[in-house]
Image: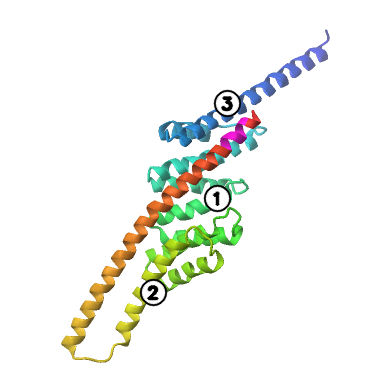
Amino acid sequence: MNFINRVWICFSVLIFFAGNFYATDIKEVRSIYIQGAQALANNDLSTAERSFKTIIAMTGTSSSRTELNRYKARSHYFLGDVYFIRRDYVSAIQNYRAVVQHYPTSEIHSRTLYKLGRTLILDNKFHQAIAVLNEYLAKYDNKDNLADNAHYWVGRAYVGVKDYPRALSTFQEILSKYPDSALAYDVRGFITKINGLIEEERQAQMSAPQTLSNRLQELQQRSLKLEQEKDVLEKISGLLTIKQRLLEIKAEKVDLLYELRAQRRRE
């Protein structure tokens, strides 16, 4: 056997084993990913966290990087959900940001952008959240059937910064654009309370001149009433946060079930 034939045989063997290693490698990634997704669906958060972190830490060749990045993007996405369920909003934000910043062409980019905005609100980063959710609405509108939810959280952010007129107009927009939204009942409650706060402030400004003592007494009473109204509004906000959180966790599990079925079909 001449030298050229020997080189060709060696090259062919290397290509064969490299191809098999790549296939095995991606198959392993898929297996770890399914394990993590299944664990998350079953509330086994520790196993899910380990699985997704394992994938995120992996490196691949240039030929495998596109497929690996797809799993990395989804691992960051679901790892964000793991931390969200744990109420570790800082870590959830970090993982959602990783998808938004490093995987902008991912098919889950839009949903991740929404979740990033929502979680920023729960971490009291209201101005950042408004910017992120407005970006989501400008880019994707109702692509994920989440436009009413995005407007809802924008309204919540305006409540957080006590910008009640903008909160009111945002909530009213939900009822106008999405009258059949599941959030409509909760939104009407917000509108009622916000209207009450705005009216109280308006009445306080329009009151006729009075003696100083009477004026001070009236202002104290109005201030107390406003604080009570704000406390009620904050309590409603807290209860609705829990409700929204539970609804979204339920929706995430539905997404996971679809994802698991899709992954098993690829095997």
Q: Which residue is mark 1?
A: 111
Quadrant of the image for the N terminus?
Answer: top right
Observer able to see residue 115: yes
Which of marks 3 and 1 precedes in the sequence?
3
State if disc 1 and disc 2 touch (CB < 8 Å).
no
Magenta highlight range: 259-264
Q: Which residue is mark 3?
A: 28
Which of marks 2 and 3 precedes in the sequence?
3
- Provide the major secondary structure of the magenta segment: helix
State the CA–CA distance, disc 1 to disc 3.
26 Å
Q: Nearer the viewer, residue 189 or 213?
A: 189
Which of marks 1 and 2 precedes in the sequence?
1
Eye-nearest disc, 3 or 2: 2
At label 3, counting other C-alpha atoms closer than 10 Å, the crowd grade (few under 14, some 14-19, many 20 or more) is few
* Residue type highlighted by circle 1: Arg
Residue 89 x, y percent position in the rendering: 40, 48
Q: Nearer the viewer, residue 148 or 125?
A: 148
Residue 164 x, y percent position in the rendering: 40, 71
At label 2, counting other C-alpha atoms closer than 10 Å, the crowd grade (few under 14, some 14-19, many 20 or more) is some
> Horizontally, is 97 left or right of 227 in the view?
right
Identify the residue at the far top of this view: 1
Residue drawn at point x = 65 percent, y = 25 percent: 23
Eye-nearest disc, 1 or 3: 1
* Residue type highlighted by circle 2: Asn
Residue drawn at point x = 42 percent, y = 48 percent: 246
Residue drawn at point x = 18 percent, y = 86 percent: 214
Q: Secondary structure at mark 1?
A: helix
State the CA–CA distance, disc 3 to disc 2.
57 Å
Establish if 129 lies above or below 86.
below
**Residue 195's mark?**
2
